[in-house]
Image: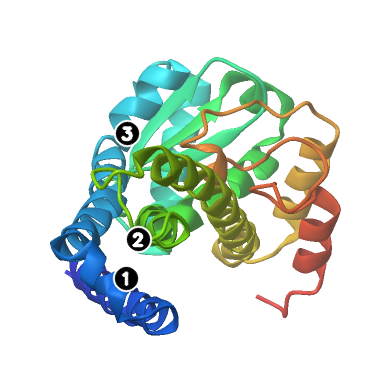
Amino acid sequence: MKRIFLFLVTNIAVLLTLVVVSQLIFAFFGADLEKQLGAEYADLLIFAVVYGFVGSIISLLLSKQMAKFACGAKTIDGSEGEAERWLVATVEDLARRANVRMPEVAIYPGAANAFATGAFKNHALVAVSTDIMGQMTKEELKAVLGHEMSHVANGDMVTLTLVQGVLNAFVLFFSRVLASVLSGGKGNRRGNGGAYVLFAVVLQVGLGILASLVVFAFSRRREYAADAGSARLLGTPGPMIAALRRLGNLQPGVLPDSLKAFGVASKRGTSIWSTHPSIDDRIEALQNLPPC
């Protein structure tokens, strides 16, 4: 219910913001622009919000199925062997500590990484790679699972979807409005279609890049929070620090774009284009945490 309320409030806030900012644009460039756009303005406003959120929400609802398909992940129940039994029992224990329902647990073939996904925190999926299971100690792997369970408990999948939906709506709406301004208020059906389309494409690409930077910055903040969450679940940051150091000596597995933000590791180094902070920065943040 809380997430549904957040979704509705976010949509209303986006609509109001788009209306206010667009009115400022019309006020700056003159009432003639609004008159020239006519009914297309209202239609575009509605379409931008629907487009911005519907695609993100559909992807979120299908995220578990898509993740399994993309990574070749197989769900387990613990009956497959000793390692699988320990994995399921550990996730169950962490889920209880995090006060969420037991998620699906899966293993996928590949280099060292792990991820969480799912539309609802009580119906999530936590998956680890075969390599990370073989390379880490149980204490380190438990910390990694705590990191992923923190993503689940914090509702990061839904929150990031809302952020992405807001930005999608803004990019679509303002690329079209500004394209109309730059092409003299003449949309693609008003005789100046070539200029309008060119401006719209360039602006959508440019604004889309800026929007991506916002998403990446948000993702990096959530990684710090998930690391801290793991420390709280285990009662000490030591295992997560050890797990990060281990990851620093491994080549992290590359996840599909839709899952990168929820993996425990990304490529080494960090920049404004990274979904994760650097290993060193994450370790420093953990070392500066107050006692659990």
**In this picture, residue 57 sits left or right of residue 24:** left
Amino acid type of the residue tagged 1 in the rendering: Leu
Q: Do the residues labelled 2 and 1 touch (CB within 8 Å)?
A: yes
Which residue is found at the position 65% from the left and 75% from the top? 292
Q: How dense is the environment of label 2, judged by Cα within 10 Å: few (below 14), some, or many (20 and up)? A: many
Above or below residue 52? Residue 73 is above
Amino acid type of the residue tagged 3 in the rendering: Lys
Distance of label 3 from label 2 (alpha carbons): 44 Å
Amino acid type of the residue tagged 2 in the rendering: Gly
Which residue is found at the position 84% from the left and 64% from the top? 284
Closest to the observer, 149 or 256: 256
Return the x and y of residue 31 as percentages of the image width and height.
30, 80
Distance of label 2 from label 1 (alpha carbons): 6 Å
**In this picture, residue 2 sits left or right of residue 166:** left
Regarding residue 73, the answer to whether it shows in the image is no
The answer to which image quadrant residue 184 occupies is bottom left
Residue placed under numbered mark 1 in the picture? 33
**In this picture, residue 121 sits left or right of residue 290:** left
* Among the two numbered marks 2 and 1 on one chain, the one whose residue lies closer to the N terminus: 1
Q: How dense is the environment of label 1, judged by Cα within 10 Å: few (below 14), some, or many (20 and up)? A: some
Which residue is found at the position 32% from the left and 46% from the top? 56
Return the x and y of residue 283 as percentages of the image width and height.
81, 58
Residue placed under numbered mark 3 in the picture? 64
Closest to the observer, 35 or 103: 35
Above or below residue 80? Residue 50 is below
Q: Tag 1, which secondary structure? A: helix
Closest to the observer, 79 or 38: 38
